Image (cartoon, rainbow, N blue to C red):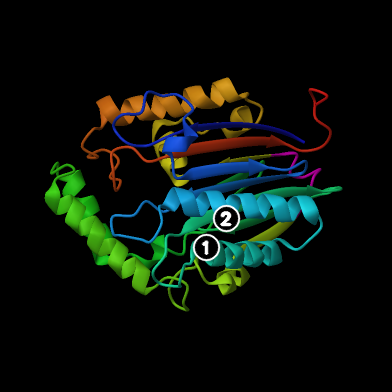
Amino acid sequence: MRVATAQLPGGDGGDGGDDSDDSDDRVFTTGDAVIVLDGASAFLPVPVPAATYADVLGKRLRDLLNAGPDRGLRDVLADGIAHTATVLGLSPGDSPSSTVTIVRQRDDDVDVLILGDNLVVLPDEVLTDDRMDQLDLPPRRRYRERLADGHGYDEEHQATVREQQVQQAERRNRPGGYWIAEADPAAAEHAILTRRPVREAPWAVLATDGAYNTMDYLGLDDWTVLAHADATDLADALRQCDTWEAHGDPTGQALPRPKRHDDKTLAAVLFGPDPYGR
């Protein structure tokens, strides 16, 4: 298995380099798996930063997969969430959260787990978990309409996004709402899980929403090309997104989004023996 990754932190001070320490996104790999996490940026106070949560959870998932490479992915995720909540002293409903995507090769098969709105692109299918977007909360509609009308990222925008987060938290990890990695390991049972033969899915591209939303808008989503790209090419795609957000759409009018720049992560995976012999 060959993996190439690139990350670009959000914020207006990003220089286009790979500086994952300033990002809430995390990527971890094992010999046969890739883990991508997108810690939820908090507009409201939480006990620990989202980056800390994603870091602790991601390392635990990596260690569990190294120790049990054939273990069920939902079971691995439940263990990871429980461990992270204990280590960080977190309680359900009052904690940071993170999306989790795991792609793993097991002999001639590829396993995919998705919890939250990361994207996994396979040669003939695009997988994501859109349950949070399906809530279609009024504050989300309102801030997107205001951005489209040209109001930009003003104080009212920030207040509306905070209101959205409050309403999302009320629906987190409960029936009729959405499911995410937080402090309740039971959320893992609601992760989307699929398995494909390697012959049908010889490659995959994993992306956080901060990357794929802008890439899709700009037409930078030739996933077959990206799947075979190296880290430099992936980083260039992310820099193009960041530059357009800063200079082509600084007020979010063309592409309404919660903030001007979100953290961006890409991971390109080729399954089977490493073509570079590593």
Residue 132 at x, y percent in the picture:
42, 63
Q: Which residue is mark 1?
A: 181
* Magenta residues (range): 196-203
* Label 1 Cα neighbours within 10 Å, binned few <14 / some 14-19 / many ≥20: many
Report the amino acid beneath label 2.
Answer: Leu
Question: Do residues under tags 2 and 1 come within 8 Å of each other at their CB atoms?
Answer: yes
Residue 168 at x, y percent in the picture:
35, 67
Say what secondary structure mark 2 lies in: helix
Instruction: Name the quarter where the N terminus is drawn.
Output: top right
Q: Which residue is mark 2?
A: 57
Main secondary structure of the magenta stretch = loop
Query: Is the residue 119 above or below the residue 168 in the image?
Result: above
Q: Let me know if residue 118 appears in the view.
A: no
Query: Is the residue 132 above or below the residue 233 in the image?
Result: below
Residue 149 at x, y percent in the picture:
15, 45
Outermost residue, bottom side = 175
